[in-house]
Image: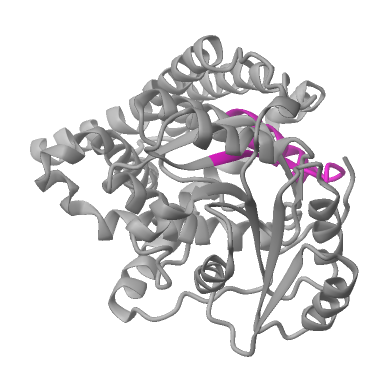
Amino acid sequence: MVFLSFFVGIFSQFVFFYPFIMSLFWMAGALLFFIYRERHESIDFDHIDWPMVSFLVPCYNEESTISETIRHLSEMPYPKKEIIAVNDGSTDQTEHVLENLAGQYKELRVINCKENCGKANSLHLACHASSAEYLICIDADAILDPNAAYYLVYHFIHKGERVGAVTGNPRVRNRSSLLSKLQIIEYASIIGSIKRTQRIIGKVMTVSGVVAAFRKKALIDVGLWDRDMITEDIAVSWKLQRHFWDIRYEPRALCWMLVPETIRGIWKQRVRWAQGGEEVLLRHWKIFLDWRQRRIWPIYLEQAASVFWSFSWIILMIWKQITAHSWEEHVIWLSLTSFVLVAMSFLQLISATLMDSKHDNVRQYLIWSCWYPVFYWILSTFVVIAALPKAVRSRIKGGYAVWSSPDRGIGRNL
């Protein structure tokens, strides 16, 4: 019994101190990035010889969104560009829409696949068809900011030959529902803080699947995207960094995207993200056998700790419920720990949102952040647990990681 109590005490300490310490860590890292790397000098777009860029747009059942995305890409002021859209076996009218668009925009080329083989396979095909050294991958429901391509490519031509990828800054387009407003705060604060801090460390967990730029030579060096990984963006990030290519974060490269606005849609999306992160842990554990990979060890350990935390929280809640001598005892323990962690969460949300408001006026949505700890902490915990068996099964099964139509939200407004 003493032995069991000791382990319960360890679990209790971990469940409390892990999010507490990591909040401080993300806030400090984001602040350092903001002070030393985000106060950029302006770039004179007109006095740089910009290289050719290929925009890669994988599509699956995008008949309602692809026209808008292609139109904005075509109208971007970037001088040398081509657009390659890949229809990955869509079951709707995406193929016909793309064929009509190809007749309207001279920069657009279309590849039609008869079978759904996944986003990574679509990117493979588009990469082979591209004629540029620099590739910008964008989702088929996203709108790229007019200057985003300049900011992304600038890293490749002015920050060194070892820059293999640059991840952009996704922004939420649909802002009418409670769930979309929560995601505005999440992208501006939680995801933004993590990206900034990881860039300070020198390694990034993942480029953004919504918008990311790549040096083709770096992609070829690592064998392009993994077709068997459910999240090709996380997988290729690890491959690049394991081969010592650098990944940058560019907060000025804005990309406006649609986010899920239903519980089912968010659940499906987050399980996929969590599964992708866990697949990476299962595939890349051998980094600890190579001293040269030591700079990516902290990113791996933090990801593994977040998975362990979710299971620990569930186990601890069940244990407290069983062993509490009274309901009041359980409520008091939960209230005290929750109060401190929620306070830390709000502090991180506020500080990071103020930093990110430089690029997007998100401060007006801070009032909705009160729902974030209640909703997202609980959701994220169960998402991680649900994703683990999927990740293990996918590593055993192998094959193409195909995709399905995501929840695009119920409203679009900027």
Is residue 206 positioned above or below 263 on the image?
above
Residue displayed at 40% across by 20% down: 25
Residue closer to the observer: 195 or 245: 245
Corner quadrant of residue 200: top left
Name the residue: 80% across, 57% down: 69
In the image, residue 85 above or below residue 49: below
Q: Which residues are magenta?
A: 167-189
Task: Please name the residue shown 47% across and 55% down the image.
Answer: 216
Residue 37: say if magenta: no
**Rendering coords of residue 12 (x, y %):** 30, 32
Q: Is residue 145 above or below residue 261?
A: above
Q: Using the image as rendered, state which of residue 146 and residue 273 is in the foreground.
A: 146
At 69% across and 29% down in the image, what residue appears? 369
Question: How far from the left and from the top, in percent, is residue 53?
Answer: 63, 51
Q: Is residue 186 visible?
A: no
Residue 341 appears left or right of 46: left
